[in-house]
Image: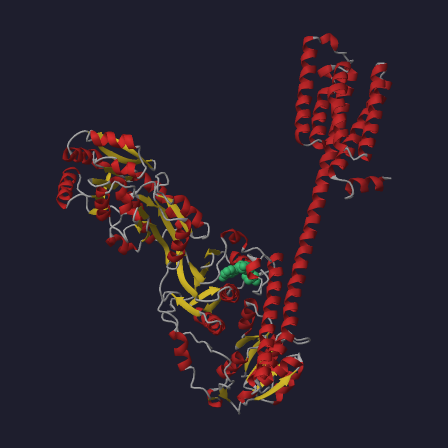
């Protein structure tokens, strides 16, 4: 019986609410049964006894039915209502009011509601309970006669009984909660342990899977390489080449799937080590250069000379990231080039941001596909890519690895034009040295070169230790060309026998072997008493390709590390490196030429900027500043009856104004469209990792702000800023952005600062009349005619990004100009006097000098730029226009 109750309360079959419901209802039923007994013994009123008995019976029925029907909430609600609205008020008045045990029972009711009800019902019943108690108190206070007064003894018993039962109930419920809590805790700990064990088992599974799969593939690739080395017929060579490609593909696929599962289960571990950047690059170049050539693509490498020569990071995983991205670049590019660029970004503390970018001139990615690029198993634009092999795993792995390293990956792509993947990984420099002009050692070869051993070492003795017979055979065969004596041992024990009898120069040692693993075997060989190999070089030859394993072999003191599937060339190189020089006879004119050849195509490093700033031709900046800051401008177009001209390139303002003066025609400035902006952004991103584009105020007619925002969707590194100004006002914001970029500020920070700066720019023009603005459709014809007829000279001001007419002067031109200058510079103390733009159209040199004199009378600027307005600005203002554009000082 007791066991059954225990199971009910502590078992997992019933949910928590049900169990609490039964517990609290039982306490309630027991308490009220006690009251029934007390009432009978103390001769209480008949109705009291009946009511309590009915209530206890009802409790049983409601609890039973609601449990069976799984409507515990409803049952609890009904019981709460019965207690609060019926039972407690009745008992309050029938057993002594506040001089009995009832006030304490109201507390019990609150506890009951809190424990069993949830959500809104709980709140409603809690309030109802307080209100019911308040009503009882108020009624008893105002009508004491309604309260049946107990004798003193009964009152004491009643009060104590309430205290007793409620203490019991509260203690039982608290105890129950504590026991449950402890039980849940134990369960959670148990689960945690199980998950940890599962993770360990999973890691073991992954590593043995990786090992088991690599071993047969090693045999296939190794033996196949032997066929390729032989002087076989073209057909056999072609078949062997296909086997090689397929095996490598299979290996790649299996690695991807294993990595994906590791990443998903959270068991992927990073092992940062100090690695040489040059070595990694040379491997990458060796891998891709030949493939690019075969496909007729140019493969460019662009390495910043200030890149640290040694970095601290998980080089195996970094290489994997780059291989994936480079693989894609090659896969999805049919003509043109693939460029790998690496440079240093920002430095935070001891960490440097290393920026890797891979650009191609391939098929590009549709804007709408970009958000799905990094989703596992998702290949975008499947229709077009169906003939290109792939699983959709590569970029997902890239993203997860980059995240794991605390870096970022972003993509810019213009459909049909090409893509750039930019990966930023924070790493520590492992020394002061920089890569400088890189000497990449590559095996850059075209076509299938006939195999030649790179050296001979007939006196050398080599021992290969591996429990897998195929592996032994592959290594022996791959080393045949070196003429060294190669012996094998298929276990640690066998190796120890051999090393006791023979002296080997180099021992290639497998790691995972039954009974005695490679690490143990090496230790015993080097300390073997009477052993002849205590000075031998031992190279780990293993299927565990991760950085963690490599770090382990380094720690253990291995002299080298080679991974399976074994690359014949790498094997030869390693042997050559380890053998004593007097035993080696080189057969190739050591890589000097090859080296020189391979570095010849590594371009003179062109440093990509971190942030470039660009704008439209309307920014009206002098050539000198455009060149100084490397600002690129995209031209607006000017549409006339005779054709469309590119702003500032095909056309300059004076010619256009002369033309307009002679012809009463409509000339319109047209901003660049989305396609033109996309192409412009893509071009600019070749020289920078991030682009800030500062657009003409989005609130003037010919702004390209919206088009720029649309075009920027194709790129993750283009920030579009609404300048809120036009002409040199926009230019001032561009200059401010350049200054911030030169200070090394991050794009988001620059954009934020510009928002504040644009409030400080003063952009205004005084024009001769509104004729030109009306021709451009910016103001009504009638207003324009009126101002012209009355010789009014309006001042155009940009406020909140919008063009408006400020003052209108009804005086001669010179006097109006003077007034405009004085008004614009009326608060000299607020003006940032470092720079002033006097931007004009159709104003003579003499007049400009006069303007400068007037300006100098008011404020002295350190630098004044006379800037001819671009045609698309000029067509709006007409001749006889100039503006004073400057910055106000920062307030704080
Ligand atoms: P896959 O194995 O299909 O190449 P990835 O995860 O590496 O898988 O890439 C996902 C998708 O992204 C590809 O299917 C392809 O459509 C697109 N993609 C990746 N890189 C490029 C690129 N350089 N140019 C064009 N499309 C690309």
Horizontally, residue 263 falls left or right of residue 185, namely: left
Query: Which of the image's four quarters has the C terminus?
Result: top left
The quadrant where residue 350 appears? bottom left
Q: Percent from the top left, x then y, of residue 791?
A: 19, 31
Which colour scheme appears in the figure? secondary structure
| The one of 216 and 360 positioned closer to us in this rendering | 360
| The one of 326 and 463 positioned closer to us in this rendering | 326
Q: Percent from the top left, x then y, of residue 250?
A: 61, 70
The quadrant where residue 816 appears? top left
Whether residue 379 can be seen here: no
Q: In this view, does 748 lie above or below 110?
A: below
| The one of 759 and 782 positioned closer to us in this rendering | 782
Whether residue 221 can be seen here: yes
| The one of 881 and 693 positioned closer to us in this rendering | 881
Q: Percent from the top left, x then y, of residue 517?
A: 64, 75
Horizontally, residue 375 falls left or right of residue 189, namely: left
Horizontally, residue 772 falls left or right of residue 467, namely: left
Q: Percent from the top left, x then y, of residue 808?
A: 23, 30
């Amino acid at each position: 019986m007791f066991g059954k109750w225990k199971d009910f309360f502590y078992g997992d079959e019933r949910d928590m609410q049900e169990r609490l419901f039964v517990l609290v209802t039982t306490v309630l039923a027991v308490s009220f049964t006690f009251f029934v007994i007390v009432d009978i013994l103390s001769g209480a009123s008949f109705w009291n006894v009946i009511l309590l008995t009915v209530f206890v019976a009802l409790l049983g029925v409601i609890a039973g039915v609601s449990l069976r029907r799984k409507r515990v909430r409803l049952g609890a609600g009904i019981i709460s209502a019965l207690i609060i609205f019926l039972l407690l008020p009745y008992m309050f008045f029938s057993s002594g009011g506040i001089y009995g045990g009832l006030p304490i029972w109201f507390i019990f009711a609150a506890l009951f509601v809190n424990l069993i009800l949830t959500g809104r019902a709980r709140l409603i019943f809690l309030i109802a309970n307080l209100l019911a108690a308040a009503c009882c108190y108020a009624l008893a206070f105002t009508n004491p006669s309604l309260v049946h007064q107990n004798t003193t003894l009964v009152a004491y018993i009643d009060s104590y009984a309430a205290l007793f039962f409620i203490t019991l109930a509260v203690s039982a419920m608290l105890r129950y909660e504590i026991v449950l809590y402890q039980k849940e805790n134990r369960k959670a700990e148990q689960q945690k342990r199980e998950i940890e064990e599962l993770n360990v088992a999973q890691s073991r599974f992954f590593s043995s899977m990786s090992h088991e799969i690599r071993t047969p593939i090693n045999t296939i690739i190794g033996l196949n390489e032997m066929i390729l080395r032989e002087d076989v017929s073209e057909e056999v060579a072609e078949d062997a080449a296909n086997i090689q490609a397929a095996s490598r593909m299979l290996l790649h696929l299996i690695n991807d799937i294993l990595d994906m599962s590791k990443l998903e289960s959270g068991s992927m571990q990073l092992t940062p080590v100090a690695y040489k950047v040059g070595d990694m690059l040379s491997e990458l170049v060796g891998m891709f250069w030949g493939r690019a050539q075969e496909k007729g693509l140019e493969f460019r490498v662009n390495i910043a000379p200030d890149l640290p020569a040694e970095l601290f990071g998980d080089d195996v995983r970094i290489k994997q990231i780059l291989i994936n991205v480079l693989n894609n670049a090659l896969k999805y590019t049919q003509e043109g080039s693939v460029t790998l660029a690496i440079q240093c970004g920002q430095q935070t503390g001891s960490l440097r941001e290393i920026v890797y970018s891979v650009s191609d001139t391939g098929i590009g990615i549709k804007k709408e596909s970009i958000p799905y690029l990094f989703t596992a198993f998702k290949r975008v634009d499947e229709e077009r890519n169906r003939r290109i092999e792939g699983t959709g795993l590569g970029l997902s792995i890239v993203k997860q690895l980059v995240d794991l390293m605390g870096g970022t990956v972003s993509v810019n792509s213009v459909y049909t034009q090409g893509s750039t993947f930019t990966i930023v990984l924070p790493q520590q420099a492992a020394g002061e040295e920089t890569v400088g002009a890189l000497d990449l050692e590559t095996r850059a070869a075209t076509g299938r070169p006939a195999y030649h051993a790179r050296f001979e070492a007939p006196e050398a003795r080599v021992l290969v230790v591996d429990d897998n017979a195929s592996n032994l055979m592959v290594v022996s065969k791959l080393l045949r060309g070196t003429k060294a004596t190669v012996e094998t041992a298929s276990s640690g024990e066998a190796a120890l026998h051999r090393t006791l009898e023979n002296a080997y120069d180099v021992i290639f040692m497998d790691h995972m072997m039954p009974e005695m693993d490679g690490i143990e075997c090496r230790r015993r060989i080097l300390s073997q008493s009477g052993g002849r190999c205590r000075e031998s070089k031992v190279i780990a030859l293993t299927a565990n390709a991760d950085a963690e394993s490599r770090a382990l072999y380094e720690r253990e003191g291995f002299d080298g590390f080679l991974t399976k599937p074994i690359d014949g060339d790498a094997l030869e190189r390693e042997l050559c490196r380890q053998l004593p020089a007097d035993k080696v006879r080189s057969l190739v004119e050591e890589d000097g030429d090859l080296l020189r050849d391979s570095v010849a195509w590594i371009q003179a490093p062109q440093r990509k900027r971190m942030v470039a700033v660009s704008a439209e031709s309307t920014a009206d900046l002098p050539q000198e500043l455009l060149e100084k800051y490397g600002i690129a401008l995209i031209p607006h177009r000017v549409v006339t009856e005779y054709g469309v001209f590119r702003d500032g390139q095909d056309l300059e303002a004076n010619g256009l104004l002369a033309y307009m003066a002679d012809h009463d025609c409509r000339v319109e400035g047209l901003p660049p469209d989305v396609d033109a902006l996309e192409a412009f952004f893509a071009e600019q991103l070749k020289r920078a990792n991030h682009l800030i584009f500062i657009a003409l105020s989005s609130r003037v007619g010919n702004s390209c702000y919206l088009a720029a925002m649309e075009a920027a969707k194709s790129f993750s590194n283009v920030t579009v800023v609404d300048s809120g100004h036009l002409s040199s006002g926009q230019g001032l914001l561009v200059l401010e952005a350049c200054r911030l970029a030169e200070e090394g500020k991050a794009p988001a920070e620059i954009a934020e600062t510009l928002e504040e700066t644009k409030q400080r720019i003063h952009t205004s023009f005084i024009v001769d009349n509104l004729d030109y603005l009306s021709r451009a459709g910016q103001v009504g014809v009638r207003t324009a005619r009126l101002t012209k007829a009355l010789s009014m000279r309006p001042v155009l001001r940009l406020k909140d990004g919008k063009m408006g007419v400020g003052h209108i002067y009804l005086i001669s031109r010179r006097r109006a100009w003077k007034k405009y200058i004085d008004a614009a510079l009326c608060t000299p103390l607020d003006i940032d006097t470092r720079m002033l733009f006097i931007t004009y159209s159709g104003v003579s040199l003499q007049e400009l000098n006069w303007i400068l004199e007037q300006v100098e009378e008011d404020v002295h600027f350190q630098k004044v730029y006379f800037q001819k307005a671009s045609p698309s600005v000029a067509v709006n203002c007409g001749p006889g226009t100039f503006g004073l554009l400057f910055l106000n000082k920062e307030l704080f």
